[in-house]
Amino acid sequence: MRSKKHLTVIIVCVIIGILSTSVYAVRLLTKKIALKKMLPESESIVEETRKLTKEEKEKIEKNLGGVMVFYQPGSESEKVYERTEYTFYFGMKDGKKTGVAIIDKQPGKWGPVEYIIALDATTAKVTDLAVMSYTERRGRPIARRNFLKQFVGKHNTDPIKVRKDIRNITGATISCVATCFAIKKISTLYEVLYLTESNESKK
């Protein structure tokens, strides 16, 4: 009888151990819901897809340390492929662009993290952001509002670095750094493709 109880305890411990170390994917937001959250004042949303030229890609990479997808030492994420085309979702109200949102993926600790990042259409500053999906072993610390809200107001000229102007989350440093990179990338991407182009045309 005692041996059966002992065996049961061992089995339960093994199951708990497996569950605590298992990697699982979590979908937090659909694209439709995410866009509504990021562009709440919009009457409609207009999509624009842009393909990067060689010169545009080089400008963006220059501000990102030479890469568009940032793999960190210690990451066990599956491969995130570099893209040359990006879709911009413009919130429209009274015939004017009130904001823009872009979806991007970066390698986290255990798998890709998918972000939606909203920007001011005239300054490329972050107005809101959310984690749409992620792959993790424990919880979802980087998807919490108290972590994400510190990126609001950031621009690609800001440091946007963990332990500098961004608070780190213990045990989730790789995912925190991935979030920093995603923010800097999207702000730079939008500025190069839309604002730089607009400024040059005014000269």
Image: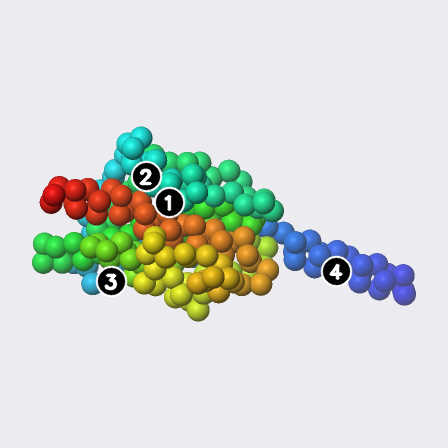
Q: Residue at 39% across / 66% down in the picture?
A: 149
Q: Quadrant of residue 43?
A: bottom left
User: Dot 2, how many residues are within 10 Å of its Cα: few (below 14), some (14-19), or many (20+)?
Assistant: some
Per the model, the C-alpha gap separating discs 2 and 3 is 31 Å
- Residue at the disc numbered 1: 63
> Which residue is at the far right?
2
Q: Residue furthest front?
A: 203
Instruction: Identify the residue at image location x=29%, y=36%.
Output: 56
User: Which residue in the structure is indicated by mark 2?
Assistant: 59
Residue 85 visible? The answer is no
The image quadrant of residue 194 is top left
Question: In terms of sequence position, does the residue under pointer 1 or pointer 3 come before the other?
Answer: 3
Per the image, the residue denoted by label 4 is 12
Query: Can you tell which of label 1 and label 3 is closer to the viewer?
Result: 1
- Which image quarter is the C terminus in? top left
Which of marks 4 and 2 precedes in the sequence? 4
Question: Which mark, by number, is residue 40?
Answer: 3
Nearer to me, 157 or 140: 157
Residue 143 in the image, given as x and y percentages of width and height: 45, 61
- Report, in whole angstroms, how far the alpha carbon at label 4 lies from the one at label 3: 47 Å
Q: How crowded is the residue under tag 1: few (<14 C-alpha within 10 Å), some, or many (20+)? A: some
Q: Residue at x 9, y 54 (%)?
A: 95
Amino acid at circle 4 = Val
Q: Quadrant of the N terminus?
A: bottom right
Q: Residue 71: horizontal and vertical position, in percent? A: 51, 43
Amino acid type, label 1: Asn
Q: Say what secondary structure mark 4 lies in.
A: helix
